[in-house]
Image (cartoon, grey):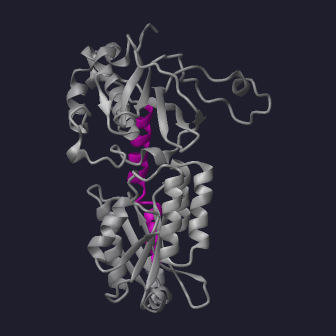
Amino acid sequence: MAVDKNSSAHNEPIDDVKSVAPSNDEYDDSSGGVDLENLPENFISPEVWEQIGKALEDFNFDDMKKLSFASMKMCVTFYYMYAKAKGFGARNKAVVRRKLDGKFTSKNLMCSREGARQLKYLENPNRKRPSRPETRCGCQAIIKFKWNPSDDSWFVRDFAVTVRNLVQQAGGPDKLPFLKKDLYNACQRIQKEEIPDGDTEAVFAYLLGKQNTDPRFFLKYTRDEDNALDKLFWCDGTSRNDYRAFGNVIAFDTTYKVNAYHKPLVVIVGVNYHRQSVVLAVSLVSHEKEETFKWILEQLTEAGDNVAPHTVLTDGDKAMANAISVVFPKAVHRMCLWNLMRNVKAHSSKTFCSGFMKCVDRCRTPTEFEQAWKELITTYGYEKEVWA
């Protein structure tokens, strides 16, 4: 496959860096926390990406060099859009950040068919299952983004594009075959269509049976435009009583995606007088959007006889935070410590994390914490950072 590769003038050395594996936390949204309404003129806005996508046949490295992005997440989202319009799938290759403060300084992405599968996986004599078909073909499409500390922007440092891409081979974007992601999405839709006559009916049969034996059993659900199960919420009489007794402080956990359909299972828990966790309600949903969380909170309010909690603990999800502010406007929203520390570790150094834990564990009053926190961010030069 022929390749047209160029190098940018922005090839300055990267000092004091380490390479780390990319994590999904880096790409939770396309903006990366950037105010899209007030982007500087030299930054490219997502509103322009669609226009760029319409002229990709004429989009070359010189055009790429003119782009500036407000965050690394916006760089990643842009290249995924570009790759899909070109007719190939993209994947992460490497991300680099400084050892001192954990600041991301470089990000590389490439074609999903880059390279070749290692021989040790193909020639393993102890393999119990046959190898999956080889999909890599040595494609060299790649893009390298670099952080510019002078204005806190990101630019394209290096770019390579396959000349004979799939769009050209197919005769146009509308004639492209399925990408791998499209195939997975199609399989998911087929799976979803099969749910009503199978697992869903079994779930309803079980829950309705519980409702017959428990007069306070609460059950609500919705279906989508295809008549497939969309949202499901339930709690038994004991959970409703526990909510009335221990519902002043509740916690939401949406990490249980272990069911066969990989759908979020939202578990709402509280703590009783013996410091034991009690399940207050459970909801199975198809996605984690703000309107979905609002629906869950509304059902919880109805099941709890219109009693609202005083404090709600979550993992910091923005959609959940917005829903809480609407349904429980007087409730205090807090982020649980486990998720807070996970985010701190993802965006800072180990020594900073250690100092932050000392602030949390050793400070007993707000005044002590504020003083320790001020000393910590001054030590690591984080005074000008925006903390949310």
Image quadrant holding the C terminus, namely bottom left
Which residue is found at the position 70% from the left and 24% from the top?
Answer: 122
Q: Quadrant of residue 306?
A: bottom left
Q: Is residue 33 above or below residue 219?
A: above
Residue 3 position in % (x across, y down): 43, 9
Q: Is residue 343 visible?
A: no
Residue 51 position in % (x across, y down): 20, 28
Which residue is found at the position 23% from the left and 26% from the top?
Answer: 52
**Magenta highlight on residue 183:** yes
Q: Is residue 12 above or below residue 151?
A: above
User: In front here: 125 or 143?
Assistant: 143
User: In front here: 298 or 187?
Assistant: 298
Q: Is residue 314 above or below residue 386?
A: below
Image: magenta residue range: 180-207
Magenta stretch secondary structure, dominant: helix
Which residue is found at the position 53% from the left and 17% from the top?
Answer: 137
Which residue is found at the position 28% from the left and 22% from the top?
Answer: 66
**Magenta highlight on residue 155:** no
The answer to whether residue 202 is left or right of residue 163 is: right
